[in-house]
Amino acid sequence: MSDSLDRSTKISLLKEPVVKRLCGVLDKSSKKGWRKLGEIVGNDRRVKVSSDDMEICSLKVLELEGSPSHMLLRLMGDRGCTTGHLMDYLQTLGNSEALQCLKPSALQILIQPQSVALISGHNLRLSCHAVGKSPVQYQWFKSKEEVPNSFSPDLVISPVHVKDAGFYICRVNSGDAFEFSQWAQVDVLNVGISHGQSYHSLDGRLKLVIQPQSQRLHVGETLQLECGAVGRPIPRYQWHRNGVPMLNAAKRKFMIPHTMQDHHGRYRCEIISSTERMWTNEVDVIIAPRISVQFSGAMECTEDDIYTIGGGSSEFFLNSIPDQLYATDKVALLIGNLSYQNHPQLKAPMVDVYDLTNLLRQLNFKVVSLLDLTESEMRNAVDEFLLLLHKGVYGLLYYAGHGYENYGNSFMVPVDAPNPYRSANCLCVQSILRLMQEKETGLNVFLLDMCRKRNIHDDSTPNIVLRVTANIVFGYATCQDAEAFELSSSGFTNGVFVKFLKKRLLDNEKITVVLDRVAEDMGQFDATKGKQALEIRSSLSDRRALTDPILPSDSADLARTQSRQWTKAHELPESMSLDFDCGAQIKLGFAAEFSNVLVIYTHIVKKPEDMSVCQAHVTDFSQELDVDPKEMNRETPEETGIYLLSSSLPQHCLYTRLSSLQKLREELVFTVCLQGTFLAMDDDHPVHWTKSVNIGKPLIARLDLHRAMRRNSCLQTCQMPHSPSHSPCHSPGPEHRLHIHQGSHQLQDHNRLSPQHHYLDICEHLQGAVGGGGNSFYDNLGQCRYEPPCDSTGGLSSSPGRFSIPIEATEDILELQTVFINSLQLQPQ
């Protein structure tokens, strides 16, 4: 083995263990780490790294296993940087520990053990092969315990049993040098005869061997669902209820220890490997209330007889539990406006809407989540929302964006509102409430995350007559004539209201009690103490809670009609395989980030042997979607703006994000372009093939929100003249700005035998002066939220820039949304 590394080797060809060690050193160093390395590289014309590139790297901090250094090295490799260049940069940086990582090791692991799922009774083989300057010795471990008599490169357990499941690792010695292999997880499935199938071999392909079974339970009993697949690499799991993915449900076995009646529904599990995806059967889970029935005489009956006694009537169950309150359905409309055309851009509404969507779905709400709506689109969205409401339904409306309040009426500002805007350009919340009252809903909840400063130039006084009804709850993110705040930084976190609301929303308490606790939590937040306080208005006469179970009304036809209306807005196109004449096969998949945001990903399933390079990308989208070609077909979801779904998307694809689907007037037709280079061609000139794809109208596009305002629009309940006056400018001066700086430091796990992940240690501290003391790259990226419109003299910052949007918020790392990379600004509206 050579004592020196070939300086002409491209960075992209470095071995994974070398890159991993190097990134570990650069990530943890503050003065001689990746950020300083990026500055050095940025000054070299051979490998130019821009400020946008550095920002992309910074965003990796908020991912569970994200590495800014790894992203920087990848960008450098894509631009032709060699190992020699990298060593020169590290020499200039003065990081000797990082340089040492590039020196050839006396020991190198060539084959790493791979995770696998297999059936009990089969043979398990894990392999680890290494080369060194002296003879190589091996020792296998299960967790931290040595596996007896396991001194060879291959660990074989024949036959394997359920007790053998766990994490395995191999220690390799060569003279004085030693290395540990990667962890390999072994999952052993005990497949009995009851499953009705037998598998005799494991060829690496994904095979479903355990299907979930339907359940019939009473309230309080334990729900247990199990599925299982075998294959290499080990598959991942995601359970869904009623077509919606559930949080904290990413294991083979899913359990709810104490069921409630709103846990009933249809369950199935999505099983994913690196190249395949499949679904289990969909099974019914019925959760019936515990009942006590008095009979005049004794009778003997089975459990099925108990279910039959009520004849399927909802009245029977209601009468059985007189103290339990029910919803006939739960429906939520969530709107987040951030990309304003004539007003300051916002950041937090995207991640706020995303977080609340996931939480409300856990409470069995039918959720429509929409971003960046114009006035007509907002009004039409409200109309569609109203179609889902009927007697006894719990209706929830959440809005995040610019807003104001005049004469007790709250106004939500669309993204196309002029500057200055007037009441006639906005949606009046009270007018929506009036329409909801007409539906005889069981609970009306309004969560308004917006400014409530008075628009002194809007003198209109709408005359909205509301019925005297109970069960109305308003949760205002701030008090009357006050601002609401968002936390503005590169961390792209929640607004202050949702930061605390999401920690309480799932509590099984009366909704006003939940909001009271949120108000108390906000009151302890030093950054906004005395500046923002939650205001609650309520006419709640019952102990209504968002956790109340759903008991559908007796009108089955009405329920089916409304369910179809909701389903229309959430139907994804089916994934498809495209076969090209050259012999290549492309997988085309789809995912929904919001009800009006579609993600398309392409993956090459089969490549002809005589083709050296093969790529597939999508193009030719409707101009109505305003898709930037530079942000399409990127190799990572984050590069194209897909932060919220990045961890749940399949890997090794090209990704494209399509927003504003509500603007689609025709079916969505686009082109899939395959580009290939053949080994037999001397000039390496690529050959192109194309296929046209029509996926109809996906998601919210089916509802045609782009149409002119409809006759039953909420505008009809709030007739307001257009005011010729200008709206006020409430631009806060420097004395009103408060900055919070929070740093994050990644913990390093030095126990080489632990399979645990590395997590972020979040440290918070306050600093009062504007722009003071911080040396962060993001010190000047702060933006105001929910600010009333100002003219050009208001001194407001312009668009927050390309990457001023929230970072990933998946179920495993929800708290990472509150991490602020280097600095965090808190600014009033």
Image: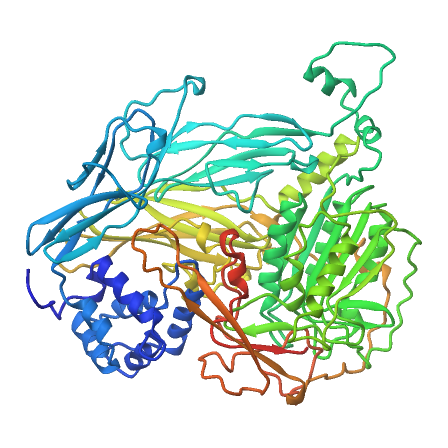
The answer to whether residue 95 of the structure is visible from this angle is: yes
**Vertically, is 799 above or below 219?**
below
Pick the residue in front: 570 or 760: 760
Quadrant of the rendering where the C terminus is positioned: bottom right
- Residue 320 in the figure: left or right of residue 95: right
Q: Residue at x 53, y 44 (%)?
A: 572
Pick the residue in front: 158 or 564: 158
The figure's colour scheme reads rainbow
- Residue 181 in the figure: left or right of residue 749: left
The answer to whether residue 621 of the structure is visible from this angle is: no
Q: Residue at x 40, y 64 (%)?
A: 747
**Vertically, is 94 above or below 366?**
below
Q: Position of residue 339 (x, y in %)?
A: 59, 69
- Residue 626 in the figure: left or right of residue 567: left
Quadrant of the rendering where the N terminus is positioned: bottom left
Q: Position of residue 580 (x, y in %)?
A: 31, 43
Q: Position of residue 776 (x, y in %)?
A: 45, 80
- Residue 460 in the figure: left or right of residue 170: right
Q: Position of residue 652 (x, y in %)?
A: 34, 52
**Vertically, is 450 above or below 732?**
above
Q: Quadrant of residue 99?
A: bottom left
Q: Residue at x 68, y 42 (%)?
A: 565
Q: Give the total number of marks visible in the rendering.
A: 0
Pick the residue in front: 569 or 397: 397
Q: Quadrant of residue 54?
A: bottom left
